[in-house]
Image: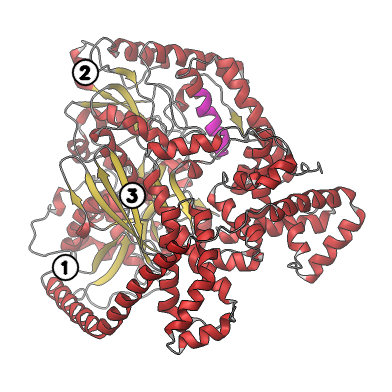
Amino acid sequence: MKKKRLMLFNRLAGKTAQTGDHVHPAELEAYADGALPSARATAVRQHLARCPSCRQQWQAEQTLITALQQSAPAERPLPPTLATQLQANLYRRMRRSMMFNQMRFSVGQLAAALLLLTAVGLLVWWQAGGFAPETEPLTPMTGSVTPEGTTPKDVTPATATPAILPPTPTATPATAVTPQTITHLVAPTYQETAQLLVRRFNQAQTQWRVQLSSQLPSGWPETPITTATDCFTGGSGDLAQLAPHLLSLDEYLAAEPDLLADYPPALLDAYRQDGRLLGLPATLAPQVLYYNASHLAAQGLELPPTTWAVADFWELATAATVNEAETPIYGYIPLDPSGQDGLSFLLAAAETTYYRAAPPQATYDDPALAQLLRQLAVAVESGVLYPLDMGGTRSDIGNRPAATAAIRQGQAAFWPNLAGLPNGLLTADPPNFAVGVAPLPYNVPLIPQQSMAHFISRQAEYPAGCWAWLTFLTTQPEMVTPGIPARQSVAASAEYAAIIGQPQAEVYRALLDELAFSPEPATAVPPPLQQWWEDALAAVGQDGVAAEVALAQAQSKGQAALECLRERGVDGEAEAITSCAQEADPTYQTRDALGGFLLLDDAYYVVATTNMMQYRSAQSVATAVAFYQDALIQRGFRLDESQSSATPEATNLLFVRENGETRRLLITPQGPEISVTLTGGG
Amino acid sequence: MLEDHALIQRCQDGDLDAFATLFQQHQQRIYNLARTILRHETEAEDVVQDTFLAVFRHMDTFKGEAAFTTWLTTIAVNQCRARLRRHKLRRFISLEWLSERQLAAAPNPASNPATLVEAGTLWQLVDQLNDRLRLPLLLRYRYDFSAQEIANMLDANPNRIYQQLYEGRQRLRQLAQQQGISPAPAEVEG
């Protein structure tokens, strides 16, 4: 982060020197302080000599600086009683501190004794089998999927693993008796499933032993993940950046042509860099619509088909809406618990958008967008659509916690989420109603970011072991990431249907048949433009503002911010985006500034938003805690289970993040509120 | 007033009277700094104690490479920042805080720049900035630390501090404009 800011500053400065444009005002103060390198100071001095505009700018800055310095309030003298009291209290604490220092030796002895005890404990635990007790009953290997078009060796590592491995330039295990250890990093959320698969793998063959980890390297994301593990499962988002640290899989794949044929070609392309395949696709996670099957059945409604249109969706959602009950049921709650936008498919179907990337352009003034927004407003008013508040510039989470709670309580006929979740929610607890799944009523092309893959580090000591393990993983119907199995034979297997449910498996098979990847790279909407869109949604859907008015406001801000970025020529920089957004909208705040996760000094601090005020109930607080838990884990925090405790109402969670030093975040629901405390670090 | 470095030398030799003198000489400054940053008198008193306790515990590590005032202020600022973080986490759903924010955002009736400067209204606007911008402005223009010293205190790069100072001044202008006042000439169009 620091490096990025410095680069921004230098780039601004460098650009000035090279192009003869104006000196950045931030740099003028550094110049006046004599803090610039001499060459740069000379350039600035020469520029100032010939540029009246910059001189005027600096004069304006100096006037404000002088006004600040001259108007600084005088120091308030301490009342004598307070000074005496402060000194007395301080001395009391100093005395205690000195007493503590005298005890330091005995405390040190105690610590040494504790360390010894811990070491002995670890040894006993290791001797007992560690993570993978050999005696634990396991799912037999023969029970795993045998994908069509592959040889049995793919699914029986005990006998086949050595045979499927091509010779590698790196070390080969000396004997099968002493297994070589490979480490695999997987998201903590999926540790449990991954652990099951590790046991299955470790027991089925003797050559390799997999150890799981969820510990990201210190300094991540600047430090590549490959420094902390031999292999890992992750997304394609940083593929270009990670490519130099990843092992090409082509060498292994050359020996297994059938394996490649089991994947959708477009999905493999998503993990290629310069023609080299760097990731073995694990799962696909397109957005789907889940539905409350119990409710639809109770209303006498037909379940959605595997192919349908947006008009069918609205008809069914409207029919499923129950307004008059004490607890209303909404036809559609579009706030995806995974954090995705649940309205994108409606925009795509209406062939409209609020932002176009090439060239960057705000398009809130598209008449089709106003038309859609008016439809959504009517849907909200009639109770078909849940009130739209995704946060915008007012809150980081909007009414997402309440929306998620409503979905879990069965108040949604339909809601969006990632495909492949057993009950349609990002939670292990099954809801008390039957859940069905349907494809989106409009086929939105996928982007590579909606999939996950397995990777091998270039530094892996035993890449052959990683390959054996990862190919084994791809044959397993249990997922270590959310989504649908990327291998078509696994998605089509009876074993997968048994896990996910036969109707769901059929939907996913149909979805895979229709699978299309977008030929265009994913468009990253600048966050302010997304937030202004959310503001417009809330203004229209909650406050009754006319769609044209709300969109005109967003258009004005969006276009001004983009023009500002264009003028500055730094459209990719987060800080420039924020700065330009604030020029366009003086009240603009980033989501970080609004709350949620605020990055300060390389540590994350959780702050809820004033919107939490609306949700003061034990249920919604528990929902919010779950929300923060997921987000913390995604941000590299680790849940310290040894110090966490759960109550029927909510959960106390302790998170730690290793980043040079340990920082701890304790989330404690206290009645209707959440207390979040941070210890450790500076 | 006794010189800091002589007092520190005596403190390092175990002279508690010297420490008491250091405390008396600097407590008012630290108290005012903490009260300004935290906007809370009782908390500021705690910071004074915590800061000097830290000085007492770590006096041996002070090598005199920076001025004692800078070292002391760095400790105090860090104590304040730790408390600010805790506040931020604790206050978010407090009604009291919400009304504080609403009050802070209320338009300021004053409109004469000269009066504003005299009355310290400019610093009332500084008080409305977020901590990322407020702290550098405070340390630079009120406590007269250099950008390099502030960078050391806040564990940041000096360039970042200059950037934040500029952003802070920009934000001040916007706030003043929103509240119908003009603290200083507006930015010149480039």
**Coloration of the structure image:** secondary structure
Give the CA distance from mark 2 to mark 1: 46 Å
Please name the residue that numbered disc 3 is placed on: A676
| Residue beneath disc 1 | A130
Nearer to us of marks 1 and 3 is 3
Q: Quadrant of residue A287?
A: top left
**Above or below for A304 versus A15:** above
Dot placed on the residue nearer the N-terminal end, 2 or 1 = 1
Q: CA distance from mark 1 to mark 3?
A: 34 Å
Three-letter amino acid code of the residue under disc 1: Gly
Q: Horizontally, is A267 left or right of A112 in the view?
A: right
Magenta segment, which residues? A524-537
Q: Secondary structure at mark 2?
A: helix
- For marks 1 and 3, the one nearer the N-term is 1
In the depicted view, which residue is nearer to us: B52 or A595?
B52
The chain carrying label 3 is: A
- Residue displayed at 82% across by 51% down: A59
Q: Residue furthest right?
A: A50
Give SS at disc 1: loop
Percent position (x, y) of residue A436? 25, 26
Q: Is residue A172 above or below residue A503?
A: below
Residue A99 point in image, percent of width and height? 28, 80
